Amino acid sequence: MDENGIDLAIGYAGPVAASDGRAGGGASQARRINEFSAEIVRKHPGRFGMFASLPMLDPEASLQEIAYAADELGADGFGVSTSYGNAWLGDTRFTPVLEELNRRGSILYVHPVDSGCATHGYESGTITGPWLEWPTNTARTILSLMVNHVIRDLPDIRFVFCHAGGVMPMVVNRIAGFTGWPVIGPERLKEIIPDGIGSQFARLYFDMAQALAPETFQILQELVPTSHLMFGTDWDNFPMSHSVERLEALHLDPESYEAVAGGNARLLFGRHSLAAMPVPPHEQDRQDVV
């Protein structure tokens, strides 16, 4: 962080995992992860915030962990996976957890994982889920939240999706265009997503880790307010310098750079004066400002 001019980071220690490595572990594991994260925050005051992990397949335990992490550990939000087994986040089994997060006005950070789908023939020791399945799984869970009316009915959850929402930005207007297809039609699409897929998508926030290619950034800017785009690193899978360099290579105007690099995160995570914000090369001597 020091080497890349990052003053403060909101960290996610990872999902509660089942024995096969997929998301779906239990309450005791969630508690250990969250107390580990809280200890890091305590040991490094002013440098870290935390997303608390939840045992989503156990709704009652998740409700208890929400209260403990928020009220005792001071979590900045909660981290969940795109799916648990074959259940995407819009599944009704998660409704009590999402309702409590909505009641609290929580930030919910969503990171992709392998789903319960069958293994695909192109995968090998090198080509694994993060190449294609994870971006697709992010889109699947966003659509699940939309068609099950979670985003509409629970508007006080601030969803933050990793990697610019995966492939979802590329298909939003495709789905919106289904109104011209007789099999669906405007009435049926309005029934499925009453306030429109574009309107719902524009309410989401996005972590831009591994998604700072110019074309990706341009598409997102056309779909959501720039105020909903935030710098991210995906460390330690990627070096922090990777994201810092890609953000700088976009050559944004100073106002947009400031917003994406940290200003938007400061607004979202209101209790922090700083948030995951790289310093532009021409301001490397002004770390106290950012």
Image: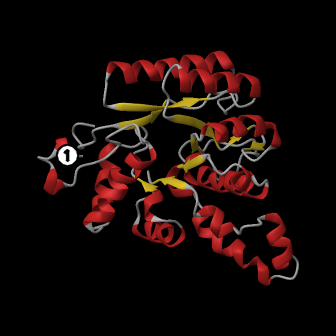
The answer to which of 11 and 243 lies nearer the viewer is 11
The answer to which of 276 and 246 lies nearer the viewer is 276
Q: How is the image coloured?
A: secondary structure
Q: Which residue reaches farthest left?
A: 285
Other-residue count near label 1 (Cα within 10 Å), few / some / many at <14 / 14–19 / ≥20 = few
Question: In which quadrant is the N terminus drawn?
Answer: top left
Q: Residue at x 77, y 40 (%)?
A: 95
Give the residue number, with chain letter if any, for mark 1: 289
- Is the residue 184 above or below the residue 127 in the image? below
**Is residue 58 in view?**
no
Q: Residue at x 75, y 24 (%)?
A: 60
**Is residue 24 in view?**
yes
Whole-percent x, y for residue 242 in the image: 33, 50
Whole-percent x, y for residue 177 in the image: 71, 79
Whole-percent x, y for residue 247 in the image: 33, 58
Count every numbered label the image shows and give the total.
1
Q: Which residue reaches farthest front?
A: 103
Q: Residue at x 76, y 46 (%)?
A: 117
Helix, strand or loop status at disc 1: helix
Find residue 186 and report its image quarter: bottom right
Q: Residue at x 57, y 36 (%)?
A: 79
Find residue 45 and report its image quarter: top left
The answer to which of 242 and 33 lies nearer the viewer is 33
- Is the residue 131 above or below the residue 6 in the image? below
Q: In screen coordinates, is 142 left or right of 68?
A: right
Identified by mark 1, the residue type is Val
Find residue 142 and report its image quarter: bottom right
- Is the residue 199 above or below the residue 97 in the image? below
Whole-percent x, y for residue 277 in the image: 31, 47
